[in-house]
Amino acid sequence: MNPIRILVVDDSVVMRKVLCEILSADPQIEVVGTASDGHIALAKIAQLHPDLVTLDVEMPVLNGLETLAELRKVDRKLPVVMFSTLTERGAGATLDALSLGASDYATKPSNTGSPAAAVAAIRAELIPKIKALCAHRVGMVTSLPPPRAPAPVRRRTHRRIEIVTIGTSTGGPNALAEVLPRIPKDFPVPIVLVQHMPPIFTRLLAERLGSHSAIPIHEGSAGIVLSPGQAWIAPGNFHMTVKRTAAGSRLELNQDAPENSCRPAVDVLFRSVAEIYGESVLGVVMTGMGSDGVHGAQRIRERGGEVIIQDEASSVVWGMPGLVHAAGQADAVYPLEQLSQEITRRVVESRSPAAAPTQSQSLILERSK
């Protein structure tokens, strides 16, 4: 098996040295070169043909965003992991990079307490992402278990979907930017979702998605009453759950232990929604690394709800949806470009007593295309 060949791009001598030491310590990874700015990086990419590039955001001569834009003119598929700071500026630049075609990002640790802790944090975040993004390129693909047929679920003939819940991770910001702006403004139920991201990032993501969507999109906060035609994203470093109250369904936040090494975790939100809404849930699992969402999807379907997933071809990493599929907990699989229409169709048709949607419901479906 060939090692994953990495080019490290960062203007900091110290950071380049740290990254090289971390990555070279893994026997499946080889650092083939470094660069201190984007201009040098582009030349070395053409010369060395790495399997993946780690790219700093702020650099002289040609910064990370400019470098990425130039790279994507000639190579749309080379995996690029942005390396950014946990700051407002760093989060904004990272989201810009993802929209320009970056594959994923890693954050430079802050307030870790010691250099050793900082190194451990970088290793824990960066190496799994590199291996997931490069698996197909270097023949490291670990086959998922054979997909099971969807587990049988008893559902009422005329059940109404009352809420949509979405889970996603690697590749999720761009996938959500494809799905949420196509949800019509008169969408009849609320949407709650988890995108694995740290604090600051989730707020900026909600703002950016909301600026291009017909429905309002917010970062979740404790006590908010859910309303139809709006979406809430779990804030970084908090699990988000739903609680039924006399005033309606409210959001709650907690900092319980991470699940699947994640906080927020998809499983936490999915379980909560399943307990409150039972068979009236539509769960959606999109592109992402790892297994978060598998047990939550099972809980949704055990309570009579539905789960649909993004297909492998359109996913950046088919870990989360692929494992839901392998567990027999997916009712259907769709490419990314069909998910918004399918979400809208299932919700609208479930809320009509007739088999076919009414004229007004047909208009809602048309707006989602």
Image (cartoon, rainbow, N blue to C red):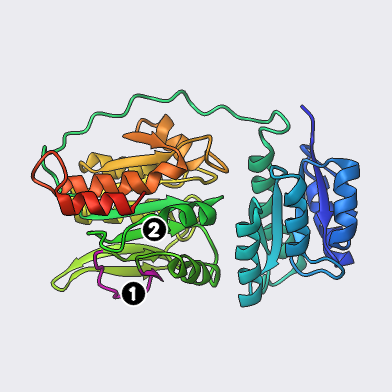
Dividing the picture into quadrants, the one containing residue 50 is top right
Name the mark on residue 222.
1
- Pinpoint residue 78: horizontal percent, then vertical percent: 73, 44
Of pointers 1 and 2, the one earlier in the residue sequence: 2
Indicate the secondary structure of the residue bearing disc 2: strand
Q: Does residue 12 lie above or below 146 as drawn? A: below
Q: Closer to the observer: label 1 or label 2? A: 2
Residue 176 in view (yes/no):
yes
Left or right: 230 with respect to 127?
A: left
Q: Residue at x 42, y 53 (%)?
A: 179
Q: Does residue 23 lie above or below 181 as drawn? A: above
Question: What amino acid is labelled 2 in the image?
Answer: Leu
Magenta segment: does it hold 350?
no
Q: Does residue 44 lie above or below 143 as drawn? A: below
Question: What amino acid is labelled 1 in the image?
Answer: Ala
Distance between mark 1 and mark 2 Cα atoms = 15 Å
